[in-house]
C-alpha cells in the first residue's frame, strides 16, 4: 500500500473524506462535501430525496470514484485504488444494505446471507454456519432453506442485514434501509442493526430522510442539494429552503 | 403505428435481431416459392417436399417468437403502462412488429425469386436460375401469396400466443414427454425406413421431443453443477442455469436435434445413401435451419442475461469480482455443451442405425 502522506487523516477516524465532488451526467450530486466518521459510531446522513445521500455513500464505499476529493479508509486512500482492489475492499471490509433487499432469487436465504463469505473463498461449511448464526440472531433462522420469493419484504430486508453483517465488516453502509417497511418492522430492523453494530464495534453510516430513523444515530450530518447543510443554506438565496417549498410553480 | 414507432427507436442489437427474423423469413419464403414452382412443373411427389419445407418455417417461427419475447419494446414498462399500454396490448404490439418483419422478408423473397426467374427485368447469372426455378411455368399468384402469407400469419399468431400473460411451467414437467416423443421419433425412423415421409415424421418427432426435454435437461445440468458443497462459482452457475432452464431449454433442444440431424447426414454420407429431399436447395435449407436454431438460442441467452441484470448489480454492489461472473457464465456453457454434444451424437447414432439397418 502507499505510505500515508503528511495530509493523512487522524488515526481515530475510520472513514474520512475531503471536498468530494461528483456529478451525474453534468448535474452536480455532491459539491465540496467533507466527512469524518469515527470508529464504532452510528452516523446518520439526513436530507430530502435528491440531496446526494446515496451518491455520498457510494463514493465512501468505493462503488463510485469521486471526480474530485479524497476518501480514506483506516489511513489508506480509497480514491486512488484500482477497481479490483476496491471490489476486494467492499467484499472484505464493508457491508451494504440498500432500500431494496437486492437478494438473488435463485439462491436460498442462507446462501444469500453467506454470499460475501463464499465470494471471498470461505469453505461451504464455515460460510453456512456463519450465515445461519446471523439469521438466527435476526430471528429468521427458520427461513434459511427457503427462497427469498417466499419471504415478506421485512424478512428479506433482514436477510440483507444478515448478508451485510456476515463477513464482520468494519463499516456498514445503510442506504434508506427502512424505506419500504412499516413502522413496527422499521423499529425492529433499526434495533437489530444498532444492536449488532454496538456489540461488534461496527461503524454504521445510515442514510435516511426520516427523523425517527435518524434519532437512533450518535451524530448526524445534514445534506441539502449535494452540500453539507450549513454550506447549502449559505449558498441558497432563500435561507429556509425545505422540500415542501422547492416545488416548481405549476402556473408558469 | 405505435409498434413501428417503438421499433424505430430501439438499439442496434435489437434491430439486428429483427433483421435476422426478416432474413430467416426471406429464406423460408424463397424455399416455399421454390417448392411451389417445382410442384407446378412436376406435380408428382411434390407433397413430401412441401412438408420438408415446413421445417424451416417452424424454425423461423420459433426464432420470431424468441426475438419478440426478448424485444425491449414488448416488455411491460412503467411509462407505457401509465399511458394505458398494459401487457395485453403490448402483446399486440409484439405480434404486429413480428408480422411486419416477416412480411418484409417474404416480400424480399418474392422479389428475389421473380428476379432470378427473369420475370421482372431480364435474366441474371446467364439464366441458371431460370432452369432451377422452373421459369417456363407461370407461378400461380394466389398460391404464391398464400404460401408467403403463411409466414407472417403463423409467426405473429404464435408470438401472440407465446407472449400472452401466463404462469410459468416447472422445467421438469416436459422431460418425460420429451423422452417419450424422442423415443417415438426414433421408432418411427426405424419402422418407416428410408421413405421420405417416414424420415420427416421421425425426425420431427425427435426434434419436438428434444425441444420438450430441453428445459428438463438444462435444469438437470444446473443441479449437477451446484451439487455437493458448492462454492460461490458453482453455486451462481448452477442456480442460474436451473432458473433459466425454461427459457433456454427449448432452443437448446431444437439446436440439439438440428445437430443430431447434421451428424446423421454425415454418418449416412460415409455409408453411401443420403436422402436429398429438397433437391439442389437442400444444403442452403439445412444452413438456414442451423443458423436459425443457433440465433434462437443466442437470443434466448441474451434475454436471460437481461432478466438477471438486477442480480448482477446486487453482486457487484457486494464486491463480487467481475471475473467470477464471467467464469460462472463459461462454466454454464461448458456444462451445457458436455450434456448436449453426447446427446446429439447418441441420437444421431441411433438414427443412422435405424436408417441403414
Image (cartoon, coloured by chain):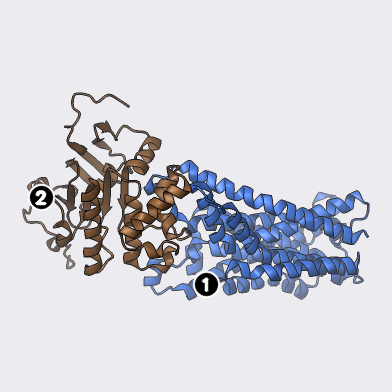
Chain colours: A brown, B blue
Q: Report whether mark 1 lies on the same chain as mark 2.
A: no
Residue drawn at x 17%, y 62% is A248
Q: Quadrant of the C terminus of chain B?
A: bottom right
Residue at mark 1 = B91
Q: Is residue B37 above or below residue A46?
A: below
Q: Is residue B154 above or below residue B19?
A: below
Q: Chain of mark 1?
A: B
Residue drawn at x 37%, y 34% is A82
Q: Neighbour class for label 1 at 10 Å: few (<14), some, many (≥20)?
A: many
Residue at mark 2 = A236
Is label 1 in contact with label 2 (beta carbons under 8 Å)?
A: no
Q: Is there any visible trace of residue A169 in the rendered image?
A: yes
- Residue A212 horizontal side relative to residue B15, left or right: left
Front-most of residues A149 and B290: A149
Percent coordinates x, y for residue A38 in the rendering: 17, 41
Which residue in the rendered view is the most extreme toward the left?
A: A239
Q: Neighbour class for label 2 at 10 Å: few (<14), some, many (≥20)?
A: few
Percent coordinates x, y for residue A27 in the rendering: 26, 48
Amino acid at each position: 500500500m502507499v505510505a500515508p502522506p503528511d495530509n493523512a487523516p487522524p488515526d481515530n477516524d475510520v472513514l474520512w473524506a475531503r471536498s468530494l465532488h461528483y456529478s451525474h451526467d453534468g448535474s452536480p450530486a455532491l459539491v465540496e462535501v467533507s466527512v469524518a466518521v469515527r470508529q464504532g459510531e452510528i452516523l446518520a446522513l439526513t436530507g430530502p430525496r435528491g440531496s446526494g445521500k446515496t451518491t455520498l455513500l457510494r463514493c465512501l464505499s468505493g462503488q463510485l470514484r469521486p471526480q474530485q476529493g479524497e476518501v480514506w479508509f483506516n489511513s489508506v486512500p480509497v480514491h486512488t485504488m484500482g477497481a479490483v482492489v476496491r471490489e476486494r475492499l467492499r467484499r472484505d471490509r464493508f457491508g451494504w444494505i440498500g432500500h431494496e433487499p437486492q437478494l438473488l432469487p435463485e439462491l436460498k436465504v442462507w446462501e444469500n446471507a453467506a454470499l460475501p463469505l463464499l465470494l471471498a473463498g470461505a469453505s461451504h461449511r464455515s460460510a453456512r454456519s456463519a450465515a445461519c448464526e446471523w439469521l438466527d440472531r435476526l430471528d429468521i433462522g427458520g427461513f434459511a432453506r427457503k427462497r427469498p420469493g417466499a419471504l415478506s419484504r421485512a424478512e428479506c430486508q433482514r436477510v440483507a442485514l444478515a448478508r451485510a453483517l456476515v463477513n464482520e465488516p468494519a463499516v456498514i453502509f445503510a442506504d434508506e434501509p427502512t424505506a419500504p417497511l412499516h413502522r413496527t418492522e422499521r423499529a425492529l430492523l433499526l434495533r437489530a442493526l444498532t444492536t449488532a453494530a454496538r456489540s461488534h464495534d461496527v461503524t454504521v453510516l445510515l442514510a435516511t430522510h426520516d427523523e425517527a430513523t435518524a434519532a437512533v444515530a450518535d451524530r448526524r450530518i445534514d445534506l441539502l442539494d449535494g452540500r453539507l447543510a450549513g454550506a447549502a443554506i449559505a449558498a441558497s438565496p432563500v435561507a429556509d429552503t425545505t422540500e415542501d417549498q422547492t416545488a416548481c410553480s405549476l402556473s408558469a | 403505428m405505435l409498434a413501428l414507432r417503438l421499433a424505430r427507436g430501439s438499439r442496434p442489437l435489437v434491430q439486428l435481431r429483427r433483421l435476422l427474423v426478416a432474413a430467416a423469413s426471406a429464406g423460408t419464403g424463397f424455399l416455399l416459392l421454390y417448392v411451389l414452382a417445382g410442384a407446378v412443373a412436376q406435380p408428382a411427389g411434390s407433397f413430401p417436399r412441401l412438408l420438408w419445407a415446413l421445417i424451416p418455417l417452424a424454425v423461423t417461427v420459433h426464432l420470431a417468437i424468441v426475438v419478440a419475447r426478448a424485444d425491449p419494446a414488448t416488455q411491460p414498462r412503467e411509462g407505457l403502462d401509465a399511458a394505458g399500454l398494459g401487457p395485453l396490448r403490448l402483446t399486440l404490439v409484439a405480434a404486429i412488429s413480428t408480422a411486419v418483419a416477416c412480411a418484409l422478408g417474404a416480400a424480399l423473397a418474392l422479389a428475389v425469386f421473380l428476379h432470378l426467374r427473369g420475370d421482372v427485368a431480364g435474366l441474371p447469372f446467364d439464366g441458371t436460375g431460370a432452369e432451377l426455378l422452373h421459369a417456363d411455368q407461370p407461378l400461380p399468384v394466389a398460391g404464391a401469396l398464400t404460401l408467403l402469407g403463411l409466414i407472417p400469419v403463423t409467426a405473429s399468431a404464435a408470438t401472440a400466443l407465446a407472449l400472452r400473460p401466463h404462469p410459468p411451467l416447472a422445467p421438469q414437467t416436459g422431460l418425460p414427454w420429451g423422452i417419450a416423443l424422442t423415443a417415438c421419433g426414433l421408432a418411427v425412423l426405424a419402422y418407416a425406413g428410408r421413405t421420405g415421409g417416414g424420415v420427416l415424421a421421425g425426425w420431427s418427432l425427435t426434434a419436438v421431443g428434444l425441444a420438450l426435454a430441453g428445459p428438463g435437461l438444462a435444469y438437470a445440468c444446473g443441479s449437477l453443477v451446484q451439487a455437493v458443497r458448492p462454492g460461490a462459482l458453482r453455486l451462481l452457475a448452477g442456480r442460474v442455469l436451473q432458473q433459466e432452464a425454461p427459457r433456454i431449454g427449448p432452443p437448446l433442444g431444437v439446436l440439439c436435434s438440428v445437430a443430431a440431424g447434421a451428424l446423421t447426414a454425415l454418418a449416412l454420407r460415409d455409408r453411401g445413401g443420403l436422402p436429398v429431399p429438397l433437391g439442389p436447395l437442400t444444403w442452403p435449407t439445412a444452413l438456414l435451419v442451423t443458423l436459425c436454431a443457433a440465433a434462437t438460442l443466442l437470443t434466448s441467452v441474451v434475454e436471460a442475461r437481461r432478466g438477471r441484470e438486477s442480480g448482477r448489480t446486487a453482486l457487484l454492489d457486494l464486491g463480487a469480482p467481475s471475473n467470477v461472473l464471467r467464469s460462472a457464465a463459461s462454466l454454464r456453457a461448458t456444462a451445457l455443451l458436455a450434456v448436449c454434444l453426447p446427446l446429439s451424437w447418441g441420437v444421431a447414432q441411433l438414427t443412422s442405425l435405424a436408417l441403414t439397418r
